[in-house]
Amino acid sequence: MNPVKVRNVEIGTGMPKICVPIVEKTKAAILDAAAKISETKAHVAEWRVDWYEDIFDFRETKKTLEELRDVLGEMPLLFTFRTLQEGGQRQAAVEDYVKLNQNAAATGLIDLVDVELSAGEGYVKKLAETAHKYGVKAVVSSHDFQKTPSREEIVLRLRKMQELGADIPKIAVMPQNKKDVLTLLAATEEMASNYADRPIITMSMAGTGSISRLCGEVFGSAMTFGSVGHRSAPGQMDVEDLAEGLNLIHRGL
């Protein structure tokens, strides 16, 4: 498996890296959240731009990106527009979604860009190619807030993301019971052991799935998501608690 390096962070080696989302509406609140994240044990910040009030005015988005980059310094930045059907705050026509992410990659201000698998294979390939043109890594993602697919389906989606050019395939699913969490973990181990030639990110959401956010180093998930203040998904832990849990497991391996 080949690690992915963004700035000074190597994803895919050692403990899972911690990513903290910024879920704020105004520039001032976004920059304040970024400053707080930069003082924690987080490795990566994610700007969830679907929360941003001026997201469809790219001139304003770029200005905010420039200031965000200054606040974060050398901390890698993941740019994410999460659509409604994948658990986000806004909807966008697929052409607008693609254009937004292409424009963000072209600024040179972001390090990773989230690309939803549901956009369609052609668009996913197009966005991954654009990201790579500007030295940006593509995190191709799939989110199911209703259920946990079968182990076979989870592995199939992750393999498809890899085929389409994802630098990091990512899947998040909702458990209905404890067995669903085991399904996600089994799929993670199968993908990491048998098919992945790059880092993958997997998680089972809500409280029931919280163990999956801690045990990635055992099963093969290279990044986990924590919170500083507002949570962007059910089951996210405070970043400091998450770091402590990851360290405990790491020391035992």
Image: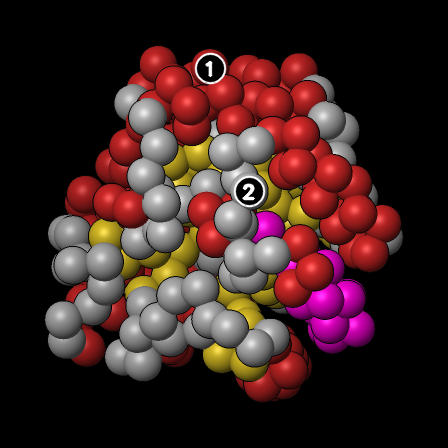
Report which quarter residue 169 is drawn in. top left
What is the quadrant of the N terminus in the image?
top right
Q: Amino acid at mark 1?
A: Lys
Chain part drawn in magenta: 30-47
Front label number (1 vs 2)? 2
Q: Residue at x 16, y 52 (%)?
A: 149
Report which quarter residue 111 is drawn in. top right
Under circle 2, the secondary element is loop
Is 236 a magenta residue? no
Q: Residue at x 59, y 51 (%)?
A: 47
Residue topped by disc 1: 126
Which residue occupies the foreground of this view, 231 or 13? 231
Provide residue 117's location: percent of width, then percent of height: 33, 33
Is 46 a magenta residue? yes
**Counting other residues with Cα less than 10 Å from the Cα at mark 1, is it few (<14), some (14-19), or many (20 or more)?**
some
Q: Is residue 48 left or right of residue 183?
A: right
Q: Residue at x 47, y 71 (%)?
A: 231
Q: Is residue 19 left or right of residue 210?
A: right
Residue topped by disc 2: 54
Q: Amino acid at mark 2?
A: Asp
